[in-house]
């Protein structure tokens, strides 16, 4: 008799790991055994799941023996090393890092958009970048209805995207500022960067490392991953990614040019009926999506929907989504649910 899956979380002590625990419990994911894995630093730490305390173990190749599904959220180098070890032991890996996302043998999936891509997986399924998931949920229905000529994005990304340490750093810097203390920034734009900048009362136009073309890797991910998720290898799309002093929820200002013309009312209707999207748009009543209001929500919210009068078929939109939920942990769990529905929790 099927009692549920044996599940592991790699990076269980991190910001996304913690949310994975909550979502697996809230959505009653069929689990018969749960193994919590992190670095050696966390061994012995106890975390709660479904009213039980579980001890964190060190993530090693042998940790995956007997595990059906593993959610990885411990950084690219951990996935690079341990995901193939897990697959070797028959575990299906749902990977939150960028390590395998552009590998042509690895499906990159937002279940509401391209769940058919899961068929024929070879053991690793990649969860897209957080901003990519959030904007693609809005772009997919537009693409289907009217075609897309070009997309220009500017992101306003919360510190949650840089992990628990970045959230703690924003908190500390605000308290230091109020107390009149000086504080040394240590975490952003990313921990191993040569220079660090304060995030409290600041904006940092750098997320991840710079590439040779002077775009950041985060901006490049949004371009490449969106093309893969939407099956549009030549999509014209460009982005500027900015870290902002917000704890949770990424926001994105999007300019979208469609091939066919659409009325604003039609676009609103289209988005209102799109899975995973809620329209929140009533300028007369000052109603629009904002991070503080939408932290912890599952849907992606879209507002400020209006015509771009500088071009023929253009629109401006404002999109907000909880980075830790739909942008990471929820999407990963939804991939797990879809694999279960399709009988794909098996390798090979
Ligand atoms: P640990 O708490 O033991 O360092 P965040 O993205 O919030 O910073 O979380 C990162 C997660 O990845 C944490 O759970 C962290 O565990 C885990 N992690 C970091 N390095 C390793 C490693 N070498 N092996 C396993 N887990 C790791």
Image: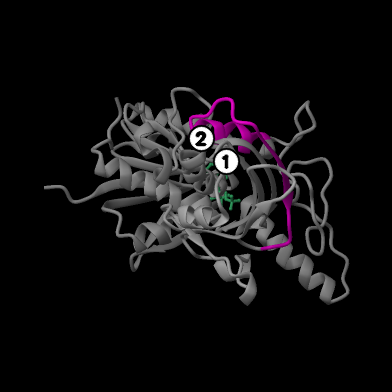
Disc 1 under 8 Å from ligand 1? The reply is yes
Report the front residue among 155 and 312: 312
Specify the quadrant of the image occupied by residue 25: bottom left
Q: Is residue 259 left or right of residue 206?
A: left
Q: Is residue 117 visible?
A: yes
Q: Provide residue 243's location: percent of width, then percent of height.
A: 73, 52
Label 1: how many Cα within 10 Å (few below 14, some 14–19, many 20+): some
Q: Provide residue 232's location: percent of width, then percent of height.
A: 52, 29
Q: Is residue 283 left or right of residue 34?
A: right
Against 163, is 80 above or below? above
Give the residue pinned by disc 2. 79
Whole-number angstrom distance, CA of label 2 to CA of label 1 = 7 Å
Residue shown at 38%/35% (left/top)? 62
Q: Are marks 2 and 1 in contact (CB under 8 Å)?
A: yes
Range of magenta residues:
220-246
Q: Provide residue 105's location: percent of width, then percent of height.
A: 44, 23
Disc 2 under 8 Å from ligand 1? The reply is no
Against 144, is 322 above or below? below
Residue shown at 65%/49% (left/top)? 254
Helix, strand or loop status at disc 2: helix
Residue shown at 43%/52% (left/top)? 274
Report the front residue among 338 and 137: 137
Against 281, is 325 above or below? above
Give the residue pinned by disc 1. 75
Helix, strand or loop status at disc 1: loop
């Amino acid at each position: 008799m099927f009692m549920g899956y044996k599940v592991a979380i790699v990076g269980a002590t991190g910001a996304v790991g913690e949310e994975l625990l909550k979502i697996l419990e809230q959505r009653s994911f069929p689990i018969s055994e749960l193994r919590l894995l992190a670095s050696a630093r966390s061994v012995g730490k106890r975390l709660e799941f479904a009213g039980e305390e579980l001890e964190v173990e060190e993530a090693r190749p042998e940790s995956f023996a007997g595990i059906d599904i593993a959610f990885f959220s411990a950084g690219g180098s951990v996935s690079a090393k341990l995901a193939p070890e897990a697959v070797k032991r028959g575990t299906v890996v749902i990977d939150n890092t960028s390590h395998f996302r552009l590998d042509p043998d690895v499906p990159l999936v937002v279940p509401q958009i391209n769940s058919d891509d899961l068929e024929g997986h070879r053991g690793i399924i990649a969860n897209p970048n957080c901003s990519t998931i959030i904007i693609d949920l809005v772009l997919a229905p537009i693409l289907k209805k009217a075609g897309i000529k070009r997309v220009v994005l500017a992101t306003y990304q919360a510190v949650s995207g840089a992990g628990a340490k970045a959230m703690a750093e924003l908190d500390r810097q605000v308290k230091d500022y109020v107390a009149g203390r000086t504080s040394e920034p240590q975490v952003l734009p990313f921990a191993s960067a040569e220079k660090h900048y304060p995030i409290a009362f600041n904006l940092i136009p750098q997320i991840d490392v710079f590439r040779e073309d002077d775009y950041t890797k985060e901006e490049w991910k949004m371009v490449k991953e969106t093309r893969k998720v939407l099956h549009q290898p030549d999509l014209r799309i460009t982005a500027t990614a900015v870290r902002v002093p917000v704890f949770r929820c990424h926001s994105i200002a999007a300019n979208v040019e469609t091939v066919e013309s659409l009325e604003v009312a039609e676009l609103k209707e289209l988005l209102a009926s799109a899975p995973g999207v809620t329209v929140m748009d009533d300028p007369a009543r000052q109603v629009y999506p904002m991070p503080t209001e939408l932290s912890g929500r599952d849907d992606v919210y879209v507002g400020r929907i209006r015509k771009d009068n500088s071009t023929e078929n253009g629109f401006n939109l404002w999109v907000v989504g909880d980075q830790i939920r739909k942008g990471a942990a929820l999407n990963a769990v939804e991939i797990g649910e879809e694999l279960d529905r399709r009988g794909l929790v098996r390798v090979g």
